[in-house]
Image (cartoon, rainbow, N blue to C red):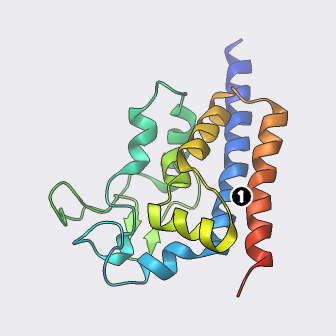
């Protein structure tokens, strides 16, 4: 019976990674973070931080280690560690209780996949306003994060999963059709 559980968890992780790829594509199409934060000398979201840190001024990848009440993150963490190893960034605090995430480098996040739901989904308020004003896209990172946790937990139906993927694909299409 445990083998079936392991196979189900692998399938949930596969679905999660598929959605993560869609969200990565969405963020790449918009390119908001790179233009407005990462390429800038100062962070837009946190005073006193370098721009290349962007929103990644804490170890948000640990969200999946801390908040285990919502779902089982063990396989996600295991796969991340297998692929990327333990995070190596050991920067000192930049501001009180603020330092770059340990997976963050001067070139941005080294994680291309296996990110926590919080890391994948989060956008700052300025980005949210930009999406509404420029594309009429209402993006709620908490809702996206909840759906990702549901996917990892296997508590989402195939129909709901397809609806979620279609919504992200629709966002991508809207952005492609409205490029300047």
Q: Residue 7, relative to residue 116: is it above or below? A: above
In this view, which residue lies farthest toward the left?
96
Q: Residues within 10 Å of mark 1 (few under 14, many from 20)?
A: some
User: Residue at left 41%, top 36%?
Assistant: 65
Q: x and y percent of residue 128 in the render?
A: 53, 62
In this view, which residue lies farthest toward the bottom?
180
Provide the secondary structure element on which disc 1 rests.
helix
Q: x and y percent of residue 107 in the render?
A: 44, 76
Q: Quadrant of residue 13?
A: top right
Q: In the rendered image, which residue does mark 1 sit on?
A: 22
Q: How many marks?
A: 1
Q: Quadrant of residue 32?
A: bottom right
User: Residue at left 47%, top 24%?
Assistant: 69
**179 displayed left or right of 145:** right
Q: x and y percent of residue 114 in the render?
A: 57, 50
Q: x and y percent of residue 129 in the render?
A: 53, 66
**177 displayed left or right of 5:** right
């Amino acid at each position: 019976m445990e083998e079936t559980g392991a196979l189900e968890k692998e399938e949930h992780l596969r679905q999660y990674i598929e959605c993560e790829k869609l969200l990565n594509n969405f963020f790449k199409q918009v390119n908001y973070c790179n233009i407005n934060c990462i390429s800038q000398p100062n962070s837009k979201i946190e005073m006193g931080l370098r721009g290349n840190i962007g929103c990644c001024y804490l170890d948000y990848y640990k969200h999946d280690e801390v908040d285990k009440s919502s779902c089982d993150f063990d396989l996600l963490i295991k796969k991340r560690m297998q692929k990327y190893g333990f995070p190596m960034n050991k920067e000192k605090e930049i501001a009180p209780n603020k330092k770059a995430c340990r997976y963050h480098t001067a070139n941005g996040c080294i994680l291309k996949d296996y990110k926590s739901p919080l890391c994948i989904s989060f956008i700052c308020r300025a980005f949210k306003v930009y999406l509404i004003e420029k594309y009429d896209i209402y993006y709620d990172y908490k809702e996206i994060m909840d759906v990702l946790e549901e996917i990892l937990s296997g508590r989402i139906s195939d129909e709901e999963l397809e609806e979620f993927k279609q919504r992200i694909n629709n966002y991508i299409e809207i952005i492609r059709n409205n490029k300047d």
